[in-house]
C-alpha cells in the first residue's frame, strides 16, 4: 500500500500555473499552483483579512487571466491551512497565516482545520471579533479589516 502524502508534499507538488479557456465561456481562467496560493496568503499582514475573491482576483490580474478557478483555489487554500497546522505540530513557527482568509461574507471556512474553531481562535488573538451565528463563525465588521489590494 502506498504511503499517504503529507500536506507539505501536496503543497510543494511540482507544477506550473496554466491559463485555459473556461469551459463555461467566461474567458481565460488561471489554474494556480498550491505554492502560488501559499505565497499570497503569507503576504496578508497581521490584523488584516482577505476574502477568497480578493485572492482569486489578485492571482488572475498577476497572470493576465480573466479569473482564477474557484474550485482549485478552494482546494489549495485547504492544503495551505493543513500544511500550516502540520508544520506547527512539527515545531515550525513560520507558518502561513491561512486564518486571515475569510469567505466573501466574512464567514470562516468550515473546511479548514478545526471546522472554523481554530481559525476563530487565531483571529481573536489578532483582535478580531468572531461570533458563532446560525452555526457559522463570522468575523464582525470584517469589511473594515480587509487588506488593500496593493498590500498583496
Image (tube, rainbow, N blue to C red):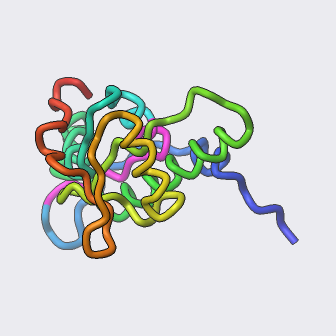
| Residue 52 location (% of width, % of height) | 27, 51
Residue at point 25%, 48% (across, down): 56
Tell me the magenta residue range.
Answer: 27-38
Seen in the picture, residue 91 relative to 104 is either above or below; the reply is: above
Residue placed most toward the observer, 124 or 50: 124
At a point 17% along the width and 25% down the height, the residue shown is 150
Q: Is residue 85 left or right of residue 41?
A: right
Q: In which quarter of the image is the N terminus?
A: bottom right
The structure residue drawn at horizontal position 61% and vertical position 28%, both measured from the top left corner, is 93
Q: Is residue 30 magenta?
A: yes
| 59 lies above or below 52 | above
Instruction: Please tell me which residue lies in front, 22 or 140.
Output: 140
- Residue situated furthest right in the rendering: 1
Q: Does the magenta stretch include residue 90?
A: no
Q: Which residue is drawn at 12% across and 44% down?
A: 143
Q: Give percent across and percent down for residue 63.
A: 26, 37
Locate residue 142 relative to residue 4 in the image: left or right: left
Amino acid at each position: 500500500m502506498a504511503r499517504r502524502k503529507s500536506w507539505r508534499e501536496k503543497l510543494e507538488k511540482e507544477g506550473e500555473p496554466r491559463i485555459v479557456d473556461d469551459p463555461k465561456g467566461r474567458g481565460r481562467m488561471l489554474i494556480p499552483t498550491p505554492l502560488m496560493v501559499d505565497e499570497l496568503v503569507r503576504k496578508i499582514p497581521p490584523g488584516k483579512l482577505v476574502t477568497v475573491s480578493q485572492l482569486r482576483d489578485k492571482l488572475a490580474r498577476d497572470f493576465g487571466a480573466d479569473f482564477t478557478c474557484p474550485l482549485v483555489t478552494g482546494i489549495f487554500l485547504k492544503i495551505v491551512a493543513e500544511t500550516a497546522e502540520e508544520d506547527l505540530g512539527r515545531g515550525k513557527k513560520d507558518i502561513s497565516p491561512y486564518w486571515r482568509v475569510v469567505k466573501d461574507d466574512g464567514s470562516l471556512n468550515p473546511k479548514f482545520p478545526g471546522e472554523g474553531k481554530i481559525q476563530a481562535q487565531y483571529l481573536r488573538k489578532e483582535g478580531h471579533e468572531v461570533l458563532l451565528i446560525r452555526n457559522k463563525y463570522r468575523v464582525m465588521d470584517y469589511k473594515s479589516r480587509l487588506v488593500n489590494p496593493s498590500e498583496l
